[in-house]
Amino acid sequence: MSPPAISAIIPTRGDRPESLRRLQEQLARQTLPPAEIIVIPGQPRPGLGRNLGSRQAEGEYLLHLDDDASLDGTGVVAALFEALRSDPRIGLAGAAIAVPPEAGAFQRAYARQFPRSEIVPPAQVTDSDLATTLCCLMPADLFRELGGYREDLIAGEDPELRDRVRRAGYRVVLAPGVRVFHPPPADLRGALRRSFWYGRGDAQIRRRIPPEAWRRSCRPMGPARVLLKALALPLALAVDPAALSAGRLRLRRGGIYVLCGYAHAAGYLKGYWAERGAAATA
């Protein structure tokens, strides 16, 4: 049986050439290497870049990657493919995210306060909202049937696609035993900029996609909830919200989390009013 034809698609702004080169070398060393690697440079909107690469791709499966991803081992692509093959209801398989071994002190502090930065790989194929475009595999036919990524979003194109995959009746999973390294922001300035940008992206999604089009667990917050969350942020300096929601009281240090939360709220409000202004003049 011949190996499946996999097309790897990597959009890049061009400012991380060393990371991109390392990723391409890692893909070439995989036990199931992609048949082609398509690099799409210079597209400001990630969904547009990923779609451009997908239109050029000739493989049966599309492997979407970020240009600063780093594969942990040579079996990542094979594990993603085996996860997809294990159940015809699976439409998208991703890898767990981990902090690179060479990460600095600030990056590790950031990861402790943002648990999604460091995910333990599951022991078996597991349904998850943590399968992201950092590294994920899906059948090309399904990707095209769903219309690919939205091209008008500045951020959040992967949760939006995950939601459509699920609404089409397919599962979204993490593959067992594999992970991909992704560096957190190197310093506080970078962390604040990232949070501000994500806030703008969340506001854009909220204005452009009706809430009823999302599953309840994935709906972006409205402006009132964003403001309430911002007011409650100082509690994160002392109380772990995740533990509290599970009925446990646990203290934490959340200085980075709190400051990033304010940056996210500021970005959200900027994006929300910009969208309203654009709609009013349209």
Image (spheres, rainbow, N blue to C red):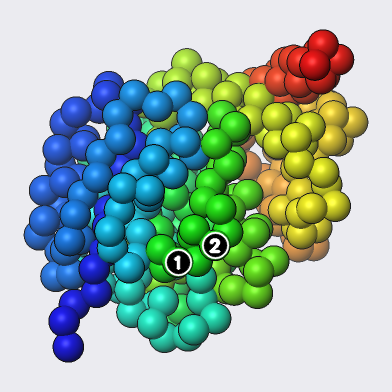
- Judging depth in this view, the residue of 151 and 113 nearest the camera is 151
Q: Residue at x 58, y 42 (%)?
A: 150
Q: Quadrant of the N terminus?
A: bottom left
User: What amino acid type is highlighted by mark number 1?
Assistant: Asp
- Judging depth in this view, the residue of 254 and 265 nearest the camera is 265
Rendered image: mark on residue 227:
none
Q: Which residue is mark 1?
A: 141
Q: Quadrant of residue 103?
A: top left
38 lies left or right of 132: left
**Residue 261 appears anywhere in the view:** no
Secondary structure under the numbered disc 2 in the rendered image? helix
Secondary structure under the numbered disc 1 in the rendered image? helix
The relative height of residue 201 versus residue 76 in the rendered view (above or below) is: above
- Circle 2 crowding by C-alpha within 10 Å: few under 14, some 14–19, many from 20: few
- Judging depth in this view, the residue of 110 and 132 nearest the camera is 132
Q: Residue at x 15, y 42 (%)?
A: 22
115 lies left or right of 190: right
- Per the model, the C-alpha gap separating discs 2 and 1 is 6 Å
Badges 2 and 1: C-beta atoms under 8 Å apart?
yes
Rendered image: mark on residue 145:
2
Q: Residue at x 78, y 27 (%)?
A: 230
Q: Locate residue 96, reporting x and y percent.
A: 41, 60
Total labels drawn: 2
Q: Quadrant of the C terminus?
A: top right
Q: Residue at x 33, y 79 (%)?
A: 82
Residue found farthest to the right: 224
- Judging depth in this view, the residue of 120 and 224 nearest the camera is 224
**Residue 54 appears anywhere in the view:** yes
User: What amino acid type is highlighted by mark number 2?
Assistant: Glu
Q: Locate residue 104, reporting x and y percent.
A: 31, 32
79 lies left or right of 149: left
Q: Locate residue 253, reporting x and y percent.
A: 60, 36
